Image (cartoon, rainbow, N blue to C red):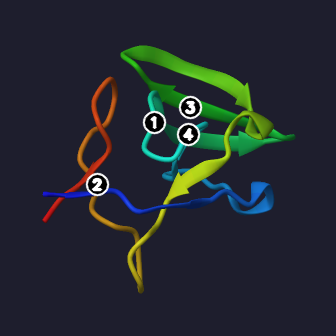
Amino acid sequence: MSAVDWIPLERDTVQAGDQVSADAGGMPIYRVVAVEDGQALVEGDGRAPTPLPISRFHWKARTAVGGDAKMLPLFGGAGRKAD
């Protein structure tokens, strides 16, 4: 397995399925479930989906060219990309 590549988050590009974090490779890492009105409904750390301001996040996982990278569950764990 290789580590997730983190890129600076552009707030207007956040969408469902993105993995976001306040720190590149930091904890916690959340998966975006939905986005509405500047809020991201995120899940992670073993908690139910929670709305948080997108402005809280500064990094997102880079997606593979031509589609999303195949990601392993990250809830409560280190960000990792499947080989």
Outermost right residue: 37
Q: Earlier in the sequence, mark 2 or mark 1?
A: 1
Residue 79 higher or lower than 9, as above or below: above
Query: Hey, which quadrant is residue 45 in on the image?
Result: top left
Q: Earlier in the sequence, mark 3 or mark 1?
A: 1
Query: Hey, which quadrant is residue 56 in on the image?
Result: top right
**x, y percent for residue 28:** 46, 27
User: SS of the residue at dot 1?
Assistant: loop
Q: Earlier in the sequence, mark 2 or mark 3?
A: 3
Which residue is pictured at 44% across the width and 29% down the height? Answer: 27
Q: Which residue is mark 4?
A: 23
Find out whether the residues at labels 2 and 4 contact each other: C-beta distance under 8 Å: no
Task: State which mark lies toward you, 4 or 3.
Answer: 4
Q: Which residue is mark 3?
A: 42
Task: State which mark lies toward you, 2 or 1.
Answer: 1
Task: State which mark lies toward you, 2 or 4.
Answer: 4
For the residues labelled 2 and 4, the Cα–Cα distance comes to: 18 Å
Find out whether the residues at labels 4 and 1 contact each other: C-beta distance under 8 Å: yes
Which residue is pictured at 40% across the width and 62% down the height? Answer: 5
Give the amino acid type for the residue marked by disc 1 in the picture: Gly
The numbered dot on residue 71 is 2
Give the amino acid type for the residue marked by disc 2 in the picture: Met
**x, y percent for residue 48:** 47, 15
For the residues labelled 2 and 3, the Cα–Cα distance comes to: 16 Å
Label 2: how many residues lie within 10 Å, few (<14), some (14-19) or many (20+)? Answer: some
Q: Which residue is mark 1?
A: 26
Q: Earlier in the sequence, mark 4 or mark 3?
A: 4
Find out whether the residues at labels 3 and 1 contact each other: C-beta distance under 8 Å: no
Answer left or right for 2 relative to 71. Answer: left
Give the amino acid type for the residue marked by disc 3 in the picture: Val
Residue 52 higher or lower than 82, as above or below: above
Which residue is pictured at 79% across the width and 39% down the height? Answer: 55
